[in-house]
Image: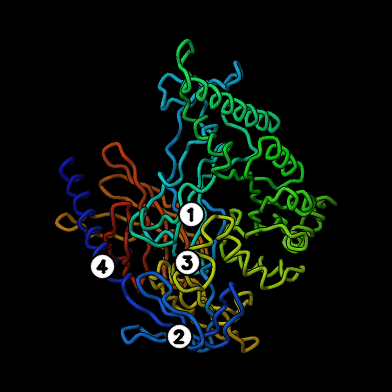
Amino acid sequence: MKNFILRFYIAIFASFSLGLSINAQTRTETFAITNARIVTVSGAAIEKGAVVVRNGLIEAVGANAKIPADARTIDGTGLTIYPGFIDANTSLGLAAAPAAPQRPVGQVGGGQLAAQTSQPQSNSNYPDGLQPEEYAAGKLKAGEAQFETNRNAGFTTVLTVSRDGVFNGQSAVINLAGDTVSQMIIRAPFAEHFSFTTLRNGQYPTSLLGTFSALRQMLLDAQRLQTLRQVYDKNPRGIKRPETDKSLDALLPILNREMPIVFNANTEIEIVRALDLAREFNLNAIISGGQEAWKVAGRLKAQNVPVLLSLNFPKRTAAASPEADAESLEVLRLRAEVPKTAAKLAQAGVKFAFQSGGMTSINDFLTNANKAVENGLSKDAAIRAMTLSAAEILGVGNRLGTIETGKIANLTVSRGDVFSKDKTITHVFVDGKLFEQKEKPKTTTPATGGTQPAATATVGGTYSITINIPGQPLEGTLSLTQQGEILSGSLQTQLGTTPIKDGKVTAEGFNFTTTVELGGSTFNLDVSGRVTGNQISGTMTTPQGAVAFSGTKTP
């Protein structure tokens, strides 16, 4: 078994190396999109022009841009080119965290929250969930298949960070392409993220007031530690050596305004508490979520605090019926006011970017951005909120967010206005790599004679598959259960049986993630494929590379 595992990893690595070679050739390809409308964001739209992409960068843009002889030309007649869309807060690309061992309840004392454990994992004196040193870039998994759904919706870049804990850790700005983690990263770390939540298993803090107090105490402890170190470094004689603490060390860049802190705050009281804390400690703060940010727009502007505004608008979870409980006036008011928040922030001069806010379907992003437009936000401001404003808030505005010569070639190409219901994303470029979208075939609606997108593919069933590892094919069974666009099931091989996670069905095929254990270690498989008749085929991608699989449906 050990020899098989070794051969498996060697085969994966060999496939990965080959993929790198092929990918390197792809990224050097030169493209020219001609005769298209170009929304540069940095200036006026160009009604008919060209964008030239070479070596992952924008080489030329304009009505009279010179088309290189070696360029692959794409006729952009009827198309509009936008800067690649940016989702300003996600958890995309992060490997699933292993189950954390239970730890004793933390105690407050001596100016610190003491975390005790029989097997310390670091020199932190704080429990899991209160460790700001957690680093998103260290948890990223490589592979482009995992981002297909988001790219198909026009997204090229995201801010990603864990959603676990009070401190969610340090986020990373990544591009949604790359066969290695290093190819994906644009900026890491970007900011520390903090959530108004509590810890599990009865650990302190167990209330939101306690959460806020814990943060404030940790900032005070970090300030004190920094002062002690400065005194000790100047003249250590006769002074007890200051302790080291990984968690407090992670707060020092925040206190020194070298790193922003993002407060996940939706209610007015949470935002006010975050702003008060930012003022007390002179923090470079950002609000994420911000459903009620319009209530404190004046303070946000005065303190120069931007907002990563969630487009995951509140909605009724149960279908309206005579038997359903009536919604409170407060809930009804919130649902009515949240789509107006973007326009109110713009009117107050508050800088903001759009984020998906954990929405179940990324396609709701543009739908809800359009609702913000319908509620008073200009279209130009909406486009800016998911391109240049997002890039500027994330500190990468000199590389992303506009269509300008020399910037990273992240482009989203649409047929039809990007906010219209009948738009189609036709091409997406990430780091100059083309992901060409297949326009969904149309079907005739009998009652009206109109057209609508074709239904999702039919992929449900049990398949005997072969994972084509060079020199050591691996046999298995893939069981797929389909409910509309939702896919569940399991993958069974001699390595064990693992459940499908995040399964989705599209018009062309399916994709899902699963976790495999080998030799005491775990890694994620990102699987994408399609079904033709009773035949199935596709690709399984790991952090080490990708291998193909194929098989046949069993009766």
Check contact, mark 1 vs mark 4: CB within 8 A: no
- Residue 203 in view (yes/no): no
Q: Amino acid at mark 1?
A: Val
Residue at 74%, 46% (x, y): give it.
267
Q: Amino acid at mark 2?
A: Ala
**Residue 511 in picture, x, y percent from top left:** 42, 61
Q: Quadrant of the N terminus?
A: top left
On screen, residue 400 versus residue 221, left or right, reads left
In the image, is residue 310 above or below residue 201? below
Q: Nearer the viewer, mark 2 or mark 1?
A: 2
- Residue 159 in view (yes/no): yes
Foreground pick, 199 / 481: 199
- Residue position for label 1: 173
Q: Secondary structure at mark 1?
A: strand
Q: Earlier in the sequence, mark 2 or mark 3?
A: 2
Q: Residues within 10 Å of mark 1 (few under 14, many from 20)?
A: many
**Residue 400 in picture, x, y percent from top left:** 50, 64
Q: Which mark is residue 151?
A: 3
Q: Amino acid at mark 4?
A: Ile
Residue at 67%, 32% (x, y): give it.
212
Q: Which mark is residue 65?
A: 2
On screen, residue 470 versus residue 217, left or right, reads left
Q: Which mark is residue 22?
A: 4
Q: CA distance from mark 2 to mark 1?
A: 30 Å
Q: Earlier in the sequence, mark 1 or mark 4?
A: 4
Check contact, mark 1 vs mark 3: CB within 8 A: no
Q: Earlier in the sequence, mark 4 or mark 3?
A: 4
Q: CA distance from mark 1 to mark 3?
A: 15 Å
Q: Nearer the viewer, mark 1 or mark 4?
A: 1
Q: Earlier in the sequence, mark 4 or mark 2?
A: 4
Check contact, mark 4 vs mark 2: CB within 8 A: no
Q: Quadrant of the C terminus?
A: bottom left
